[in-house]
Image (cartoon, rainbow, N blue to C red):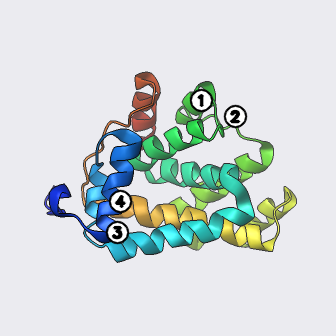
Amino acid sequence: MIISTPPTETATGHVAEMYADDVENDGLVFHHTRVMAVNPEAHAAFENLIRAIVPSIGVRTYEAATLGAARAIGSAHCLLAHGRKALRAEVLSEDGLAGFARGEDTAFSPAEQAVVRYAARLSRDASAMTDQDAAELRAVGYDDRQIVDITLAAAARNYFSRALLALAVPVDDVPGLDPAIARALVSAAAE
């Protein structure tokens, strides 16, 4: 990786908080955290955006949008991190996450499956989307605010994932994931 990142031993402010969160939760500082620590204001803004999105759609729908976008983009970083988050939040079981890695979305509810499809379309070719795409979300019960926030969740994942991919950030092992599921998620990103 060509980017020089702030050293842990001299980190202060938001950077120190980012590093401490990783160490507290996982025992290491992830490469993606180190890279985002180069611009801590942008990282804080990203976190604030996510905090503004989740209340209207909930964690399950947020993770459906995030995982759908990450799989479509091919982001192993985000598939691993949010796969584990989905497990911890009991959004998906290990079997459900393994199925998701294989392209099976049946562990999500029908409404959440619509979110996964929507996030994937946004991630593959947002310019080709039409009112029909949002109408599919409305048809499964999402209101205007939720449709906007689902769109923002998928777009935010595009921002974060594509930045990591463009900077060739190494993919770390994510503690707490079954190794077979982790391999399946990395394989899903490569497809």
**Residue positioned 83% across, 64% down in the render:** 138
Q: Which residue is mark 1?
A: 99
Q: Secondary structure at mark 2?
A: loop
Q: Say left or right for 109 vs 33.
A: right
- Nearer to the camera, 26 or 153: 26
Mark 4 nearby-residue class (10 Å; few <14, some 14–19, many ≥20): many
Measured in 3D between alpha carbons, the distance from the residue under mark 1 to the one under mark 4, in whole angstroms, is: 31 Å
Give coordinates of residue 105: x percent, y percent. Answer: 66, 38
Q: Do the residues under discs 2 and 1 have CB atoms within 8 angstroms?
A: yes
The residue tagged 3 is 14
Q: Residues within 10 Å of mark 2 (few under 14, many from 20)?
A: some
Residue 25 locus on image (x, y percent): 41, 43
The earlier-in-sequence mark between 3 and 2 is: 3
The reply to whether dot 3 and dot 4 touch (C-beta < 8 Å) is: yes
In whole angstroms, how far apart are the C-alphas of marks 4 and 2? 31 Å
Of label 2 and label 1, which has the lower sequence position? 1
Q: Secondary structure at mark 4?
A: helix
Amino acid type for the residue under numbered disc 2: Ala
Say few, some or many: other residues with alpha carbon within 10 Å of mark 3 (under 14 / 14 to 19 / 20 or more): some
- Give residue 120's position: percent from left, percent from top: 58, 55
Q: Earlier in the sequence, mark 1 or mark 3?
A: 3
Q: How far apart are the alpha carbons under marks 3 and 2?
A: 36 Å
The circle on residue 107 is 2
Q: Quadrant of the C terminus?
A: top left
Disc ID at residue 18: 4
